Amino acid sequence: MCQKAAGNLFGTRIGVLVSDLTWTRGEPSKFYSSEGVARGFCANCGTPLFYHNEESERVSVSIGAFDSPSDIALAFELGIEGKLPQVAQLAALENFGTSEEDDPEGTDLARRTSRQHPDHDTDDWLA
């Protein structure tokens, strides 16, 4: 389910108590992927934000939604029965940045304007 929801090999999330989570700029939209399970996302840009079994006191927030995700230590892997074999290949792959010089696909990502993180330049989202 996490792979489908993230549209990727895996979804990396950080568990926090619901009582400790504060949305500072509005509330995320929710999609109920199954009974009692909400998946939150930004209605403005589509970014997946969280997974919450509403019977739990914890919510799992997407690590990439934080301003400084590299500061967050990971503690464990969950759901490894669905781990795709491509994950083992990641460390051995050739690495490229998204600058004009590094982009092997020529997609010109560095010069595109990102609207993926609107909380830095508008006041209508969350931190």
Image (tube, helix red, strand yellow):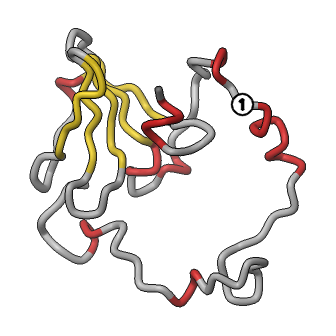
Residue at x 57%, y 18% (from the top left corner): 78
Residue 10 in percent (x, y) is at 58, 36
Residue 88 horizontal side relative to residue 83, left or right:
right
Residue 109 horizontal side relative to residue 92, left or right:
left
Q: Is residue 100 above or below residue 115?
A: below
71 or 90: nearer the viewer? 90
Label 1 crowding class (10 Å Cα cut-off): few <14, some 14-19, many 20+? few
- Give the quarter of the image for residue 46: bottom left
Residue 58 in percent (x, y) is at 29, 19
Residue 76 horizontal side relative to residue 24, left or right:
right
Residue at x 89%, y 49% (from the top left corner): 92
Residue at x 71%, y 31% (from the top left corner): 84
Q: In this view, does 102 lie above or below 72?
A: below
So how many labels did they put on this image? 1
122 or 86: nearer the viewer? 86
Q: At label 1, which amino acid type do we have?
A: Leu
Residue 32 in percent (x, y) is at 23, 28
- Give the quarter of the image for residue 88: top right
Element assignment for label 1: loop
Q: What is the quadrant of the C terminus in the image?
A: bottom left
Residue at x 53%, y 34% (from the top left corner): 3
**Residue linked to disc 1:** 84
Residue 29 in percent (x, y) is at 17, 45
